[in-house]
Image (cartoon, helix red, strand yellow):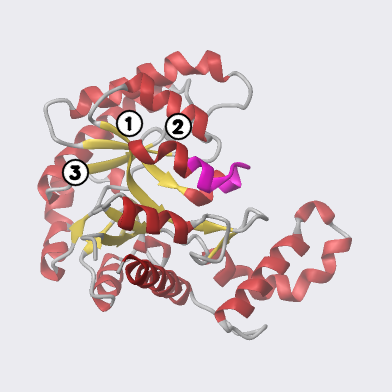
């Protein structure tokens, strides 16, 4: 089996670091993708605070970072004050990376209004190069994640960015669910971008644009993971990011109020209710059964492990 590594955004269960670390060890894993830790975003910590308040517990549990799930670049393109502030935050994140011997920092390509992408492109590139200036002289790689409502939310623009940046410290992070939610075919996006992608988020999505457990949506994860492991010898990270906490929180609310669908069609109540009932059926959950965020995350891990096992058997 390829030397792949499973990480996760464990803050989808809780921001409490100890609970996150206990979950990681319960799975027999050793990697975390930090985002929210003890009530603060990772980018809100200085390196000094991190080393004093966070690292000792990470060391105690023997947990390392796969990447830093930063919010860098997730600001309005024309927000100059925000950009200056993010440059400073990135400097601290680089120090945290060095403390943790971590190679990757996740970034975004700025929030923009739809329509004027050719006009946005030069400024997006200029500001991303400003981020690259911060990591110059290190071995840290900035991972661009495709995300909703940013410049790089669709595969052609992501490809254009990658080609224009043309820098060894600028690579791609692939999120199939985000492509689906933006109206794009995730398997086709994978085929277009796989030669430039070094990191993968495990987040699946139905055609209704609602997140579902991995392997139960339109993300094409079985085919993608099979290609990565059996054809491309991928040995990097897969980071769990189910986002199905909405299901855990809202499924019984939609069960109770699905009758409102006809009265408030714009709320898409029927669509959400339909997908949640489908998840119930596929995961063996009764209609009114409560499901915790922790259980949803455990589903993501177990379903992903099933896919890995299928891929492993196919490669033998």
**Is there CB contact under 8 Å for labels 3 and 2?**
no
Q: Residue 278's x, y, as percent?
A: 66, 72
Q: Residue 207's x, y, as percent?
A: 65, 55
**Is there CB contact under 8 Å for labels 2 and 1?**
yes
Q: Residue 218's x, y, as percent?
A: 58, 56
- The residue that mark 2 highlights is 75
- The residue that mark 1 highlights is 86
Whichever of callouts 3 and 2 sits on the residue coming sooner in the sequence is: 2
Element type at mark 1: helix
Instruction: Find the magenta span and give its range.
Output: 180-189
Taking 208 as reference, is 140 above or below it? above
Taking 223 as reference, is 151 above or below it? above
Mark closer to the observer (3, 1): 3
Q: Residue 68's x, y, as percent?
A: 27, 47
Residue, x 80% and y 51% (percent of image)?
A: 266
Any magenta on residue 45? Answer: no
Q: Which of the pair 227/18 is nearer the observer?
A: 227
Quadrant showing the N terminus: bottom left
């Amino acid at each position: 089996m390829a030397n792949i590594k499973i990480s996760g955004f464990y803050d989808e269960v809780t921001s409490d670091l100890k609970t996150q670390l206990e979950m990681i060890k319960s799975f027999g894993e050793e990697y975390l993708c930090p985002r929210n830790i003890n009530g603060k975003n990772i980018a809100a910590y200085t390196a000094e605070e991190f080393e004093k308040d966070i690292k000792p517990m990470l060391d105690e549990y023997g947990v390392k970072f796969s990447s830093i799930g930063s919010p860098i670049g997730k600001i309005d393109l024309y927000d100059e004050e925000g950009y200056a502030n993010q440059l400073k935050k990135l400097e601290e994140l680089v120090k945290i990376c060095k403390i943790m011997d971590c190679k990757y920092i996740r970034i975004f390509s700025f929030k923009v209004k739809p329509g004027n992408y050719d006009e946005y492109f030069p400024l997006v590139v200029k500001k991303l190069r400003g981020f690259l200036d911060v990591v110059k002289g290190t071995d840290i790689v900035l991972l661009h994640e495709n995300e909703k409502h940013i410049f790089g939310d669709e595969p052609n623009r992501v490809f254009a960015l990658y080609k224009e940046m043309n820098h060894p410290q600028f690579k791609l992070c692939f999120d199939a669910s985000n492509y689906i939610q933006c109206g794009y075919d995730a398997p086709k996006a994978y085929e277009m971008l796989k030669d430039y992608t070094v990191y993968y988020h495990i987040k699946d999505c139905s055609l209704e644009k609602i997140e579902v457990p991995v392997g139960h949506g339109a993300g094409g994860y079985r085919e993608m993971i099979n290609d990565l492991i059996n054809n491309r010898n991928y040995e990097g990270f897969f980071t769990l990011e189910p986002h199905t906490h909405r299901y855990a929180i809202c499924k019984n609310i939609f069960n109770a109020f699905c009758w409102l669908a006809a009265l408030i069609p714009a709320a898409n109540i029927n669509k959400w209710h339909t997908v949640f009932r489908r998840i119930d059926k596929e995961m063996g959950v009764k209609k009114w059964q409560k499901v915790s965020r922790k259980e949803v995350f455990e589903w993501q891990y177990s379903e992903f492990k099933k896919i890995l096992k299928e891929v492993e058997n196919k490669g033998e």
